[in-house]
Image: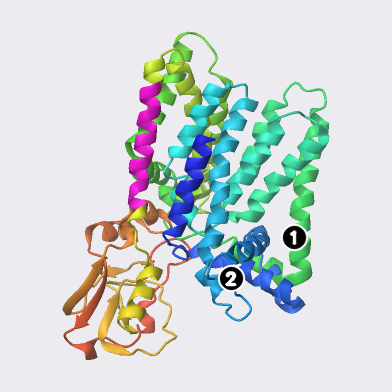
Amino acid sequence: MAILVASAALRFALCLRGGQYFLGDEERYDRGVSLYNSVAAGDTAAMRQVLGLPEHPLFAWLGAAITEVQRGVAAFTPYGDWGHHPENIAFGIWIAACILSIFSALNILLVALIARALGADWAEALWSALLMAVSNTALYFSRHLVPYDTAICAALASLLIGLGPRSLPRVFLSGALAAAVYCLYNGYWFLPPVIAFLCLCSWKGDSRVISRVAAFALGAMALAGTVFLVGTWAGGSQYWKIMRAFSGTVTQGVYTEGWSLPWAYLWDSEGCLGAAVLVLIAYAWFRSSRDGRQPGPRLAFGLTGAGLIYALMVLFSVALKIFVVYGRTVKPLVPFLCIAGGCALGQLVAERRTVRLMVATGLVAGGFLMAIPHFTFVFPRDVEVYVLKNFGNPKRTLSVSGSIYIPLEATVSRPELALVNDQVLYPIKDYIGYPEGRTLFRVENVLNYRPFQYEGHTPRQRRILREQDISIRLILLAHPEAVPDDLPYPLRNQVRPNGHES
């Protein structure tokens, strides 16, 4: 309970600090809000418009349910009047982020319960939970309105049910949850087959294994079939056309670094703490082999799950050149490595009380040190609100060329000012520098945080982000006429479908 309460409190605190609508996938959360509003208004046409979009369809359903809870919680805040002030939905979006972050905290509990289902005692299960709780990769996405943790939660729940008592209804539910992973976030397409394989391994030698496989498959088809039928009803043939087109869009990046990006990302996200856990896992495996013993089932389970995920990522990126690997793609490795790491810690420090206390203290301290920077981040949306409130509406420009830019909707009221880099810089063609003038204030760009640089940026683009100044600045222009009121269209260079820079 201490681990769960502390982890949930940490996530709520992050959500209250803002940061929503920074990542590209967060815009998809608004579909859930739209679905909620259309259902509440009885607008069938608007409802079908949302349900007819096949990208992460179940996340829109979940978003609608969270919006209902948000409205109930908002009644106790200044943002409760949605009838006369619909903008309060956006002002209170941190409430939705807090609710969504519960799934991230729930994953910690599920890791411990899976370890228990595999035969671990509570001491070992708590080591796995503690590793998950202090994981930076498992933490920092929780403030954002993204489907990653909800999909991982469905995957872990599917595994927990599939590994438990083997009644056919439970296996059916396990299969349904495995399909829900893909429907919540299409980018985790590799998790359902990994779940199915791990469950099948646990059923080995069972006289009813064929019945269980059939029940698992029926559960998966029932859930996915329901989602696809609703989408087809809402969108018709266009639903499947969009789905086919969307499946070919995972190309922002470089295919050939699919084998190395997971390790580079984990090093920048987890640091020395993550490296130490990997060393402990390797040592526990080596010691078991040296003593002629089979590795513990949790160790084998964790390494098998992580190995299968990594193999599928490498196969479909480096070999087949179908999907590029992102930082968010690597997130599902963490629960499996935490289960294996918990097993390793359970074996190595089980009989040493002083060592146990030192290791636990070190893990908690390391986790807090990794979490502290997240409370110092200032996101573009927060800067925008501050500037509009205190300076009016300035011009916008960037210190890099080639980034996707959304044109201004409001008229510039302060043409002598320019707000630079107040957005996600993606993609990046070249560094062009800042316009000449006096800097009124400067804020570090969140993209200086390295884990964010693995969400589609190529190695060359990451070098620019790390070597050049990309801070957010408000500049009093020396030559206002040299900066247009809005960025010209040619600066909006994209990335070609083959994953190479244009």
- Residue type indicated by callout 2: Gly
> Percent position (x, y) of residue 9?
48, 47
Distance between the alpha carbons at the discs numbered 1 and 2: 34 Å
Q: Main secondary structure of the magenta part?
A: helix
> Percent position (x, y) of residue 143?
47, 56
Element type at mark 2: loop
Task: Look at the image and give the residue range highlighted in magenta.
Answer: 357-374
- Vertical arrangement, residue 174 with respect to residue 380, above or below: above
Q: Residue at x 35, y 85 (%)?
A: 486
- Residue type indicated by callout 1: Phe
- Vertical arrangement, residue 347 with respect to residue 196, above or below: above
Q: Which residue reaches farthest front?
A: 76
Residue 340 shows in the view: no
Q: In which quarter of the image is residue 298?
A: top right
Taking 67 as reference, is 208 left or right? right
Q: Do the residues labelled 1 and 2 touch (CB within 8 Å)?
A: no
Q: In which quarter of the image is the C terminus?
A: bottom left
Badge 2 crowding class, 10 Å Cα cut-off, few under 14, some 14 to 19, many 20 or more, is many
> Percent position (x, y) of residue 37?
67, 73
Front-lying residue, 240 or 327: 327
Q: Does the magenta stretch include residue 163?
A: no
Q: Residue at x 36, y 67 (%)?
A: 425
Q: In which quarter of the image is residue 51?
A: bottom right
Q: Quadrant of the N terminus?
A: top right
Q: Earlier in the sequence, mark 1 or mark 2?
A: 2
Of circles 1 and 2, the one toward us is: 2
Q: Is residue 373 magenta?
A: yes
Taking 433 as reference, is 310 left or right? right
Residue underneath mark 1: 228
Residue underneath mark 2: 80
